[in-house]
Amino acid sequence: MNTYFNFNLLPWHIFEKIYYLSLNIDECDINNNLKLRLVCKYWNSMITKHDFINLYSKKLRIDYINEENEAKNISIYKYIKDIVKENKQIICNSTTNNKQAKIVIDKFLTEKLYFNNDFIFNTHINNYLYNKIHPDLLILSHEILNNNLNGINVLNIPVCYFKSSKCIENICGEECANNYHGLLNYTNHYISRGFDDKGRFYLLFFYKDFEKNRIFYEFIYTAEFKHTNISFDVITYSGYNNICYIGNLSYKKDIMLPYFKRKLNSNSFDYALRLINFEKCGPVEYDFDTDKYIEYEYVYSDDEDHDSDDQSSTRLDVSLYFDKKEIQRNINYNKYINLH
């Protein structure tokens, strides 16, 4: 027997607490937070815009240095209230007239300045997203004028709640890797963003090699690299059976990192931007003669049954692509070939 629970029947204070806990802060999923008020008319009426901003500001926390030069981590709500309190103290200690009126006006203007969507969302985005992205990755959000490629707004990329750092680093095991780490349970888009259980930002791509009729995934993420007494972050990559069209274009011996060959460079970023813009991209394979990965282009003979010449110029050999059923067939095929 199926049973259903009606949240609308909950007492207000319990409903508000559940709503507060449902607000996503760590992944900076602002679109999801905004949609919470749109679940139904009742939720929209119970959580007014004012209530929404108050709850949001109470859950959103920032680091700041106070007047005593002490590092503090407090909610935005308390931060704003402290400003109001400090301004009130300044007015009370002054020799001005009409102190009470000025205190009321200052409180109104301060709260109007800070308790609004623009300030709350911008604070959330800057502190929980952009400040945690490696500067090299931000190139994907800019327009590359030389190549006439448009960047992508990181904030608009769908959020993926996949967390396993072991899977992202491909140290989880063969069975998990063959199953694409269960990623289909966490995303439904060909590009998504998220943070793993180590707090590292990542991008997850799905793309299809149309000639091979295979769909691959690829993680682009930040990894900490330690060499002698130096520790710093680099952008690296991972994918199924090292089939990484984006990352492998950067595979090489690096003078600065002689023991690490998987640091992303401009070749990979250019390929990723072409994927994002649905421009011409080819398969990336290892070339034994040059000892490096090279991007190829499929060439068809006249007697092969392929698209016409007019279509071939616009045909994409590799493109961003997501279809759950088709990806699941790929996963089943991976399991089959590993059993035989």
Image (cartoon, rainbow, N blue to C red):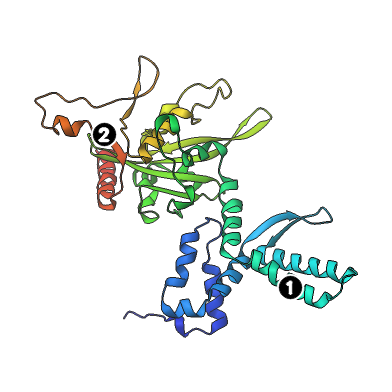
Q: CA distance from mark 1 to mark 2?
A: 63 Å
Compared to residue 30, the image places residue 270 above or below, namely above
Q: Which mark is residue 105?
A: 1
Image-based side of 4 in relation to 131, left or right: left
Q: Which residue is mark 2?
A: 317
Percent of width and height locating residue 251? 45, 26
Q: Amino acid at mark 1?
A: Ile
Q: Is residue 169 visible?
A: no
Q: Residue at x 81, y 70 (%)?
A: 88
Q: Residue at x 52, y 76 (%)?
A: 47
Percent of width and height locating residue 244? 38, 34
Q: Which mark is residue 37?
A: none
Residue 301 is drawn in which quadrant?
top left
Q: Is residue 286 visible?
A: yes
Image-based side of 53 in relation to 288, left or right: right
| Outermost residue, left side | 303
| Outermost residue, front side | 97
SS at circle 1: helix
